[in-house]
Amino acid sequence: MTIKLDGKNALATGGSSGIGEAVARRLAAAGAAVAAGAAVAENYRSHPKKAQQMVAVIKADGGKAMAIHADARKEHRDCT
């Protein structure tokens, strides 16, 4: 099944590694502009290079992406 997401925006929590990274890459491959962030703020703060590397790979493949710090577990979302 092929999904076209051209012109759409997507948020991939946990997007700097594992399943979240795979989801971010698939969303970008389908045409979405992806904001990928660590679901646990400490992961992004302690390993920001991993998130930036994932963004670089998506951009090198012609996609749009950005890394963000976002803790989706909290009622008040802290995004920087």
Image: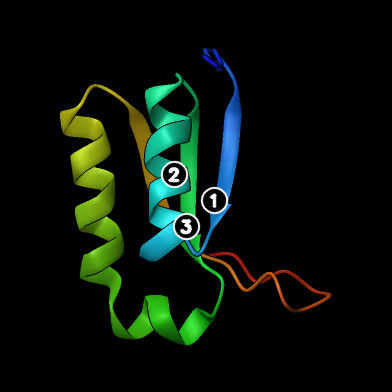
Residue that mark 2 sits on: 24
- Residue 47, by quadrant, is bottom left
Marks 1 and 3 close (CB-CB < 8 Å): yes
Judged from the image, the secondary structure of the residue bearing numbered disc 1 is: strand
User: Considering only vertical position in the picture, is 57 above or below 60?
Assistant: below
Question: Residue lying furthest left in this view?
Answer: 60
Give residue 55's position: percent from left, percent from top.
28, 46
Marks 2 and 1 close (CB-CB < 8 Å): yes
> What residue sits 36% from the left and 30% below the top?
64
* Amino acid bearing label 2: Ala
How far apart are labels 2 and 1 at the CA level?
A: 6 Å
Marks 2 and 3 close (CB-CB < 8 Å): yes
At label 1, counting other C-alpha atoms closer than 10 Å, the crowd grade (few under 14, some 14-19, many 20 or more) is many
Judged from the image, the secondary structure of the residue bearing numbered disc 2 is: helix
Q: Is residue 49 left or right of residue 70?
A: left
Residue that mark 3 sits on: 20
